[in-house]
Amino acid sequence: MQEEAVDNEVTEIRISGYGGQGVVLAGQLLGKAASLYDNKSAVFTQSYGPEARGGASCADVVVSSAPVDYPLVSHPDVLVTLFQEAYMKYRPMMKPGGILILEPDLVQVKKDEVPHHRVPATKIAEGLGRKIVANVVALGYLVGITNVVGREAVEECIRATVKKQTIDLNLRAFDAGFSLAAKERVAS
Amino acid sequence: MTPATAPAIDEHPRVISGDHFMLGDHACAEGALAAGLDFYGGYPITPSTEIMEHLAERLPAVGGTFVQMEDEIASVAAIIGASVAGARVMTATSGPGFSLMMENIGLAAIMEVPIVIVDVQRASPSTGLPTSVGQSDLLQVRWGSHGDYSVIVYCPSSPQECFDLTIAAFNAADQYRVPSFVLMDEIVGHMTERVVVPPQEKIQRVYRKRPSVPPGSPEFLPFKADEDLVPPMAHAGEGYKVHMTGLTHDERGYPSLTAQTHEKLINRIVDKVRLNADRIVRYELINTEDAEIVVVALGCTARSARRAVARARMKGIRAGMLRPITMWPFPQTVLKELAGNGVVKRFVVPEINLGQLCREVHRHTALPVTRLNHPGGAMITPDQILEALEA
């Protein structure tokens, strides 16, 4: 159907967790990589208002090969949840057949959950020496699984965005997530 | 006074030329800097606060002056004063603060002081929904202060336009000596998207006309207009004798409390925009060449409408869109042309209020106008607009 063609150009992504996990930075990196380093268009929005202070928070990115018109994420094609409360809150909104990526050490899935991707982002980040880059590990995994933006685009974006002394750490975190996704793709 | 061109410290360029992934509110602030903002006086309020926060850091760094005022009434008073002294000025607010500004907007209008006010609309009236979208200040921005006066109002629907139209607002305010407005909404202010900032030399700045005679010259009349109905502006402290008052005044600026003076002055401050409307008006047309149904939408709602029109086309519905970029002056000439072209059968007007834009559309056409309203708190979706196009 032609009508679907319009919407298929658009990928709605929600990265969710709790305040301090860096979901906003992950979303900004993704949107910025798509629109400045990958010839795509992207709109980034974040949860705003009282709910953004404590509890579940989210970063939304709409990516498209054409200019993005409607800017909001209503039913994510890709949902990343790094925290139980975020999983509970945002899982029902995910598009049927969408890609679910979660942090298994922080999210307990419901019994009848569909097949999904389990990324121990926090443990991987700890292995790299800093727990705070779990967000970028998750971002690397998301990019590796979905191909929504090119790997080089995100790497270039990281170099241009994060503090100079953390560029290397963030690139390693991104690579760790990306490589894990690549391995899983080969395995399946 | 030309602090706009004062040397900026290298690490803090006034114009950050290049491609950015930027928040709408920040793009507005950067547009103001690029336009030569010298003075910002404001009071923070959601969802405009990011504009003020951004300028609190950026403006002093490029040699400008930033003042947090005690409220929104004082904010407009402060920027009026700074503008009279020669500065390029701005303030930003949202609904409740905007209501407080109304009195001094009239003062700027009658004294013909160029000022730029940004209103990032949220769901209203009163405190309403502070963090959620609204588009219900479309008429207040035109008619909110008492009396007859004219304003110029730009409605961005993307962060790029927040940048571009803020520059346009500065230029229009100075060119016509009027209050000009950037009428944003929460969605546009709080979304982050690609913004291209051009090289500084590509950014056009229009400045107010200045007196052609030296200070002290007996023939100088501060409110004597040229043919374009706009008087050249002398700045405080330059030595010109200028009396500024909210009372009806003659060409000397002195109160002249007669019906004749009032008629002359008020007609002129209204006509200087009305008679130049075709030069000021901006709009965008999409697929209107053969359109039978035309959506009229602005701000964030135009983004939903764009999607709805594309989908309708794929279903064989001949839909198009008129997007007013200036809400005031309203693009009435093009609307009348569309209404009279024999092809358009009706208009659809989605807006986040209970019927303000559609009121203006109604005034210029006898064709049916389908309203699609929401009082605020959520965007109107492409699905809802598509449904109205199919009905």
Image (cartoon, coloured by chain):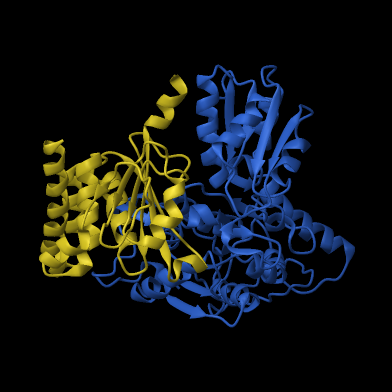
Chain colours: A yellow, B blue
Q: Is residue B172 left or right of residue B160?
A: right
In the image, B149 versus B261, the foreground residue is B149
In the image, residue A79 sits, relative to residue B294, either above or below, namely below
Determine the image quadrant of residue B97: bottom right
Q: x and y percent of residue A61 in the render?
A: 37, 48
As drawn, B32 above or below B41:
above
On screen, residue B107 versus residue A164, left or right, reads right
Q: Quadrant of residue B208?
A: bottom right
- Looking at the picture, tell me which residue is in the foreground, A83 or B323: A83
Residue at the farthest bottom position: B70
Q: Residue furthest front?
A: A111
**What residue sits 37% from the left and 49% below the top?**
A111
Which quadrant does the N terminus of chain B fall into? bottom left
In-image side of B361 versus B317 (left or right): right
Instruction: Tell me which corner region of the image, top left, top right, bottom left or bottom right, holds residue B265.
Output: bottom right
Apparent side of residue B98 relative to residue A126 in the rendered image (left or right): right
